[in-house]
């Protein structure tokens, strides 16, 4: 089966969706997995992605300085932080995005990120507009389920098709709990959580595309 790397993920939600369909799937993050797994690599994705992979999906790259919602901190930093720190973190985030996006030895790449501001776009090598923007509720079938949420999610895609919506809801009952998460040390983790219905669609549709390419190359 296709060999797949899920980058910047500790929850295992996307990894497990691909594993459930039989793919040789590994997650990678600087932090340990939320629950024990022998399929999680604790390390820098920029090193791990140098191996041979058929598909790399980077789900939660550090985006605090890249996204529109955080652009205000580039002119007035939060308490106890400096402008130099804000711009250095922007450069680091853009460099990581660039490294993943330009990993040309991997035939299929998907990167998830919120909408970016212009300073981030200017710093990303070979920047392109996102191929697709989705909402988790577009992959939900249960109004009370975890996918019935509003969270605009952009995908930058190379060698992969746009996702086809698999949900049955119209968005009118979608919650906004991700954006309304209470301030605190774990707010970043709540806001970066992924959604099982969306992960299942990725595994089915992108996994099939990667497997087709893998089979053709092995023939």
Image (tube, grey):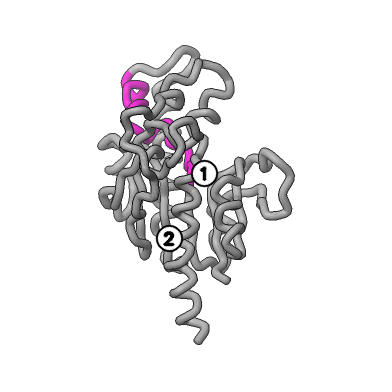
- Which mark is first along the chain, 2 or 1? 1
Q: Which residue is mark 2?
A: 205
Q: How many marks?
A: 2
The image position of residue 32, as x and y in percent, is 68, 41
Q: Picture coordinates of residue 8 (x, y %)?
A: 54, 45
Point out the image quarter for the N terminus: bottom right
Residue drawn at x 61%, y 58% as measured from the top left: 19
Asked if residue 121 can be seen in this view, the reply is yes
Q: Which mark is residue 107?
A: none
Q: Residues within 10 Å of mark 1 (few under 14, many from 20)?
A: some
Please state the horizontal and vertical placement of residue 31, each as a whole percent of the image.
64, 40
**Is 154 inside the magenta-drawn segment?**
no
The residue carrying pointer 2 sits among few (fewer than 14), some (14 to 19) or many (20 or more) residues within 10 Å by Cα, namely: some
Q: Decide: marks 1, 2 in contact (CB < 8 A)?
A: no
Residue reaching furthest top? Answer: 79
**Residue 176 lies in what quarter of the image?**
top left
Residue linked to disc 1: 196
Q: Is residue 123 left or right of residue 2?
A: left
Q: Is residue 60 magenta?
A: yes
In the image, 167 versus 21, the foreground residue is 167
207 or 156, which lies in front? 207
Q: CA distance from mark 1 to mark 2?
A: 14 Å
Which residue is located at x 42 percent, y 67 percent? 209
Q: Assign a secondary structure to mark 2.
A: helix
Q: Secondary structure at mark 1?
A: helix
| The residue stretch that appears in magenta | 59-75
Whether residue 84 is visible to the viewer of this picture, yes or no, is no
User: In this rendering, would 68 be left or right of 35?
Assistant: left
Q: Is residue 11 above or below residue 184?
A: below
């Amino acid at each position: 089966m296709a060999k797949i790397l899920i980058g910047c993920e500790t929850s295992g939600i996307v990894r497990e969706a691909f594993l459930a369909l039989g793919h040789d799937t590994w997650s990678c993050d600087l932090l340990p997995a939320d629950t024990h797994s022998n399929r999680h690599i604790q390390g820098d994705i920029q090193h791990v992605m140098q191996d041979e992979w058929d598909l790399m999906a980077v789900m939660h790259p550090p985006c605090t300085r890249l996204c529109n919602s955080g652009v205000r901190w580039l002119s007035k930093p939060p308490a106890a932080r400096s402008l130099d720190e804000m711009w250095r973190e922007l450069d680091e985030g853009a460099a990581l995005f660039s490294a993943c996006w330009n990993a040309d030895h991997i035939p299929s790449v998907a990167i998830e990120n919120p909408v970016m501001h212009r300073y981030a776009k200017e710093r990303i090598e070979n920047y392109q507009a996102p191929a697709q923007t989705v909402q988790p509720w577009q992959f939900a079938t249960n109004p009370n389920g975890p996918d019935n949420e509003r969270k605009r999610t952009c995908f930058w895609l190379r060698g992969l098709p746009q996702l086809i919506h698999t949900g049955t809801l119209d968005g009118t009952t979608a919650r906004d709990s991700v954006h309304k998460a209470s301030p605190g040390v774990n707010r970043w983790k709540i806001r970066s959580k992924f959604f099982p219905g969306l992960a299942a669609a990725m595994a089915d549709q992108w996994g099939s595309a990667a497997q087709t390419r893998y089979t053709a190359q092995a023939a």
